[in-house]
Amino acid sequence: MSRNTNSDVAIELDHHKRTILPVAGRKNVLITSALPYVNNIPHLGNIIGCVLSADVYARYCRLRGYNTLYVCGTDEYGTATETKAIQEGLSCQEICDKYHRLHKETYDWFDIDFDIFGRTSTDEQTKITQDIFKKLDERGKTEHETVTQLYCEVHNSFLADRFVNGICPNCAYDDAGGDQCDKCGKLLNATELIEPRCKLDGAKPVKRDSRHIFLNLTDAQEVLEEWVNKSSAEGKWSANSTQITKAWLKEGLKPRCITRDLKWGVKVPKEEFKDKVFYVWFDAPIGYISITAAYTEEWQKWWKNPDNVKLYQFMGKDNVPFHTVLFPSSLIGTGEKYTLLHHVSTTEYLQYENTKFSKSRGVGVFGNNVSDSQIPVDVWRYFLLLNRPETADSQFAWTPFILANNSELLANLGNFVNRVMKFATAKYNGVVPEYKVDGDVEKKFIADVNEILANYIENLETCNSIRAGLRCFMNISSLGNGYLQDNKIDNTLFTNSRSRCDIVVATALNLAYLLSALVYPYLPRTSANIIRQLNAPTRRITDTWNATDLYGGHVLGKVEYLFTHIDEKRAGDLRAKYSGLAQNATTSVKPVASSAPAKNTSGAKAVLLSEAPAGFEKTARVIELEATIKAAGETVRKLKIEKVTGDALQAALAILTENKESLTAEVAKLGGGSPVIVSAEKKKKVKKAVVTSKVEHVVAPAVTPVILEKSDTVVPLTVLPLAVEKSDTTGAVIAVLAAEDLKEQLQHLWTGWGWIIRD
């Protein structure tokens, strides 16, 4: 097929055909994502927290023409591997080989485009780690101390920090880890825990002495603090990264142990300590360097080149101090000119249906589950990135997941590309018409697109918000739908105003070409599909767009669908499949009320919140949703003012509704309820709570303030949960503070859900 396109915006992605090295005079970007530990299978939270986020940025950089290297791999040394090997009856190397393969398969399925996905159990890791240690030791940056450690007499081994749990001495959380409390975030030594217990067998460990090597961070504080202040400002670190790092510095850096009494790890090259290995958090970040060394013998051009290379690192917030304090302290301490962190991008936690992912309990979606769903990978990528927990914890839930596909991807992006491609194929025989875009309508349209494009670039250049970048290209797609709608692209336009129709079709096709570039970092297969339909080369992400990259006479490809509809009924099946109930049918589970808004069976219209009720204590998630709703509402109002109708308006309304539903559910979960208007004239029986016979688990509506219609007045009633009773017929005891004459109506509503009503 004949191509007639602007070669200036075309780019060839050949990074897998050559060894990538820094180039003088170009922007050289070195990207790492936190090395996933090798003893488990990653879940969706792990994927969005580091590898997927870094993949978006790496793909963006490549389409900008930056010289980019993306490095990751499995972290393979330490106690967790030794323990997993014992559990599975394999050697440590066999465990590493097995789980490295499983990780690689998961990331391949998610289309994570590493330049190398390596591992730390290599000769390169041993050589570079030992070399860094020797330089630190020679320069007096280490010291030796006798350490009191916890020792398990059941399996006769010193316990690594991660295999000890107990009560946090700082906040009294009863399941703090031996290295860090997940609740208050304080870093700990295992011996500081109150009532410690071995995570492997539950035994109470005893204290024993062992001599270890420490990295003297106290002497490094002044230099490190100066570097942090400079790098965090220049690199625009995420707010939580800066706060966590400066909290460490404010508390004062102390010597930190860098050796462990283990067999599986990098051996300490010092006679007195020859039976010890390096602590995983000393040598694991060095894995970024050793994996690069496995990629190219010229690794120092990346890692000892701070004047010409910018280092971007992606991780969950719990990994921040190891990358902003310990790792740079080690590199600075060698006295050599290493490439240090420029920008750190961190995430909060992704939860699964209002609970934590748990492989042991079968709760959540893990890497080996995603392909079973038969849902295209770009739908997964889209939803995870749409809900990337950038400033607060976020949720993966099946109903909004399916809604995102149907109401956003299909109704917005898919609709725009399919509509213009089908029209161009049917009316123009798949050939771009001759056109000019010098009219006022096109000038304004191009300006509007460029305004959003500039915002897209700003968000991704600074990594301020990968999620906001996604919204930018979806907003551009919405503009495209509005443009087609406003210009009434149909048979009448083609027949009666051919020259105008030519301009509209060509402009829309050029917008589809721009979108192919903007979606590429997020949805690579969707991008490839658009490129294939347009029969065009891969497009750069340029600073501006002028709607003239596909020339008149260019022959288009075959029309394809970008997305297909997912039956909403699948949400229940998928939720049940990954709820953990099937795996725990004989295990006692506490009664749990659903956080979703109560289903309205009265026939009256459900009330969705635009903001939290007055006096409600707002969380960061609630504040974020309120801001999103406000912005979405402005978009809808703008479209209505501009008299945009059809698909563009419906897509914007769907986004607004989705966020209102999320806010309503969030408020309900936190005890603020989810208002429902119930008609007194239409009392219908509500579906009873589902109660299993073997599991004390109730799936019931959230505790909900109810507003009853009575005559012309609306009476608010407060419904408060008091306690949970074990019962195979009821879920909880509810106190109802209500007017006497309304109790009968409330009784009908609540008993249908299985609740007990009392004064």
Image (cartoon, rainbow, N blue to C red):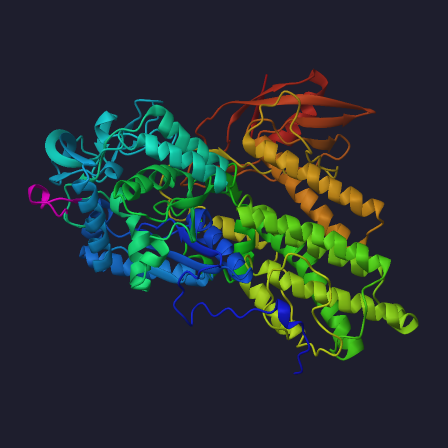
Helix, strand or loop for the magenta stretch, by majority? loop
65 to 276, vertically: above or below: below
Residue 393 in the figure: left or right of residue 162: right
Please state the horizontal and vertical placement of residue 505, each as a whole percent of the image.
Answer: 78, 68
- The stretch of residues the image draws in magenta is 268-277
Observer able to see residue 398: no
Q: Nearer the viewer, residue 648 or 498?
A: 498
Residue 506 in the figure: left or right of residue 241: right
Instruction: Check residue 270 for magenta coloring.
Output: yes
Residue 576 in the figure: left or right of residue 614: left
Tell which residue pokes out farthest to the bottom in this image. Answer: 1
Q: Residue at x 92, y 71 (%)?
A: 496
Quarter containing the N terminus: bottom right
Instruction: Check residue 549 for magenta coloring.
Output: no
Please state the horizontal and vertical placement of residue 12, each as a whole percent of the image.
Answer: 53, 70
Q: Indicate the quadrant where residue 554 lies.
A: bottom right
Observer able to see residue 158: yes
Please state the horizontal and vertical placement of residue 420, each as a whole percent of the image.
Answer: 74, 67
306 to 208, vertically: above or below: below
The total number of labels drawn is 0
Quarter containing the C terminus: top right
Q: Residue at x 19, y 40 (%)?
A: 139
